Amino acid sequence: MKIKLILSLLVVALACATTSYAKTIEVEIFKKKYIPAEITIAQGDTVIWRNIEKRQYHNVWFKAEILEEPDYFFPGESYSRTFDKLGVHNYECGPHPKMKGVVTVIEQ
Ligand SMILES: [Cu+2]
């Protein structure tokens, strides 16, 4: 009985040690800048962009991948995307094309 319990605990411990969990990475938007503008994440991670401006709206537009411009989001609001495709994903802000960012997705 005791050995069975110890064995099952070992199995659980091993499973925890070998599983890598997807993370959520935060990018702030302030004074018409993505902060940080360049991030590197692992496949399956999610990026959440938080608008912390006083009154300016923005969006996050992966122009090469998504043809239609996404909705704007306002101070206090956020936008998120989960990345499954490896590689370099460039984005910009629709209403402020000088605002640019890069999400590089690497293998876990
Ligand atoms: Cu903007």
Image: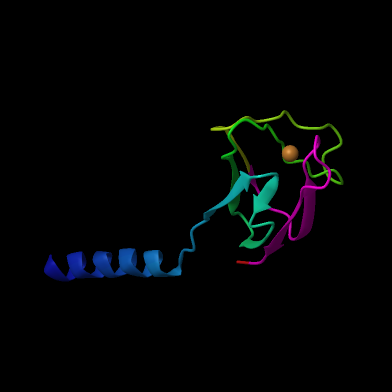
Quadrant location of the N terminus in the rendered image: bottom left
On the picture, is 74 further left or further right than 103?
left
On the picture, is 41 further left or further right than 94?
left
**Residue 99, percent across and down?**
77, 47
User: How many numbered discs?
Assistant: 0
Identify which residue is drawn at 49% across, 63% down: 20
Quadrant location of the C terminus in the rendered image: bottom right
**Depth check, front residue: 54 or 61:** 54
Q: Is residue 88 magenta?
A: yes
**Residue 106, percent across and down?**
68, 66
Quadrant of residue 14 within the rendered picture: bottom left
**Residue 9, percent across and down?**
25, 65
Q: Quadrant of ligand 1?
A: top right
Quadrant of residue 96 within the rendered picture: top right
Identify which residue is drawn at 46% across, 64% down: 19
- Whether 89 is drawn above or below 61: the answer is below
- Whether 18 is drawn above or below 86: the answer is below
**Depth check, front residue: 47 or 28:** 28
The answer to whether residue 83 is visible is no
Identify which residue is drawn at 25% across, 69% down: 7
**Residue 81, percent across and down?**
65, 43
Q: Is residue 44 magenta?
A: no
Colour setting:
rainbow
**Depth check, front residue: 94 or 15:** 94
The answer to whether residue 21 is visible is yes
- In the image, the segment drawn in magenta is 81-107
Quadrant of residue 55 within the rendered picture: top right
